[in-house]
Amino acid sequence: MQTTLLIMAAGAGSRFGGLKQIEPVGKNGEILLDYSVYDAKMAGFTKTVFVIKPEMEKDFRDIIGKRAEKLMDVDYAFQIGEDLPKGCVFPQGRTKPWGTVQAVLAARDKITTPFAIVNSDDYYGAKAYKHITEHFANSQEMCMVAYELGKTLSDNGTVTRGVCNIENGYLTGITEHYNIDKNTDLPMDTKVSMNIWGFYPEVFEKLEMGFKDFLNNLNDPMKQEYILPVFVDRIIKNENAKIKVLTSEDNWIGMTYREDLESVKKAIDELGYEF
């Protein structure tokens, strides 16, 4: 079965203080993207599409693209602020990215198979990719992989997490919670989204319609973003969309702050990868 991994890598990593997508974390200079591509390959994915900024292309091809090409087909899509649906006008003076919905839409012409979406600066664990490919083999429903909140927090600051409402194995709503740290009142086993989704190409039409509606109803044209959890929550509530929730047993590893880097390196080393 042909499947595609879409990796969103256009973010600048402002809280991290640099391009964390290409920060070495492995003993041989591997970055988190290397582990995502490797785990996806082992799970049966056949193609990777990197969504990046045009100005990042050379670094990405040199640092990760050449290694990824040894495992599977690789392609690139570019997230450009002015790339909006027909009829929408780009607000003059805006410099902030439009968010993860636009990032996924940037790859619309590159994907013709079932596909998974992941962040470039997160380690999801090998089982997450296996869960998605097994789901694709048996279902036409969209899906997501959820993690326990306690396994996704940083020791070095607060995080934003999409808290999931789940009934009978399906997502019934998702709400963004901001400024979460280890002192939160939320139970540590609360299921949260880490932006790993399983979609079919038919979703692109829904994404474009949602993005267009978002753009036509902006309250703050300079800062607002349209993100995947908001899109998913909307189609569940407005269209009765079914999103199967898959739960990963693996630990999530990610970099939000520069201070997270050493703990990430240690955690990756303990996993014992041999490329």
Image: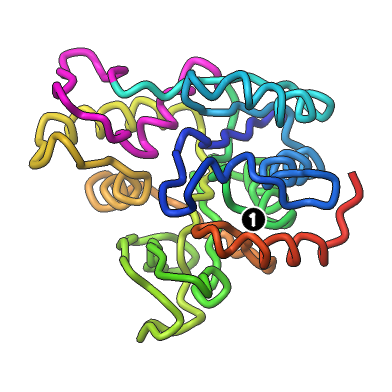
- Which residue shows up at 47% across the image and 25% down it? 53
- Toward the viewer: 38 or 138? 38
User: x and y percent of residue 70 in the render?
Assistant: 84, 26
Taking the image as shown, residue 218 lies to the left or right of residue 182, namely left
User: Is residue 25 a member of the stretch shown in magenta?
Assistant: no
Are there few (<14), some (14-19), or many (20+) residues within 10 Å of tag 1?
many
Q: Helix, strand, or loop for circle 1?
A: loop
Q: How is the image coloured?
A: rainbow
Q: Is residue 177 above or below residue 98?
A: below
User: x and y percent of residue 238 in the render?
Assistant: 22, 47
**Circle 1 sits on which residue?**
124
- Which residue shows up at 35% across the image and 86% down it? 185
**Residue most extreme to the right:** 274
Quadrant where the C terminus is found in the figure: top right
- Which residue shows up at 18% across the image and 35% down it? 214
Quarter occupied by residue 42: top right
- Toward the viewer: 263 or 67? 263
User: x and y percent of residue 212 in the render?
Assistant: 21, 27
Q: Which residues are magenta?
A: 82-111
